[in-house]
Amino acid sequence: MKSKLLTNIEESYAELRHKTSWPTKKQLIKSALIVMLASVIIAAIIFGIDKIIDTIVKLLYFGPKGL
């Protein structure tokens, strides 16, 4: 008699193998490029906001000579 764990593993494998639709290589590359581009854009936005806040804080604490 099979254990419940073994049965569960076999069913999970069968579902991954036969019922799941996997992306093609082209779709996977396209999605990865979109994620990388979005990451770069978000990083640039955060960098810009950080620089603006840094400048404001320096002006508040040190005046125009602090820049």
Image: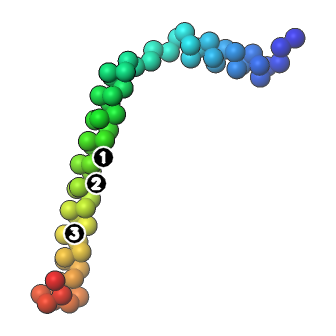
Verify CB contact (< 8 Å) between mark 1 and mark 2.
yes
Q: State which quadrant residue 16 falls in.
A: top right
* Structural crowding at the residue carrying mark 2, measured as other residues with C-alpha within 10 Å and reported as few (<14), some (14–19) or many (≥20): few
Separation of marks 3 and 1 at Cα, in angstroms: 18 Å
Give, as a three-letter code, the residue at label 2. Ala
Separation of marks 3 and 2 at Cα, in angstroms: 12 Å
**Element marked by disc 2:** helix
Q: Quadrant of the C terminus?
A: bottom left
- Write down the residue under mark 2: 43
* Structural crowding at the residue carrying mark 3, measured as other residues with C-alpha within 10 Å and reported as few (<14), some (14–19) or many (≥20): few
| Residue 28, placed above or below residue 33 | above
Between discs 3 and 2, the one toward the N terminus: 2
* Left or right of 12 in this view: 35: left
The circle drawn on residue 39 is 1
Q: State which quadrant residue 5 falls in.
A: top right
Between discs 3 and 1, the one toward the N terminus: 1
Task: Provide residue 9's location: percent of width, then percent of height.
Answer: 70, 20
**Element marked by disc 1:** helix
| Residue 1, placed above or below residue 6 | above
Front residue of 63 and 47 = 47
Q: Quadrant of the N terminus?
A: top right
* Left or right of 25 in this view: 53: left
- Write down the residue under mark 3: 51
Give, as a three-letter code, the residue at label 1. Ser
* Left or right of 52 in this view: 18: right
Task: Provide residue 61's location: percent of width, then percent of height.
Answer: 23, 88
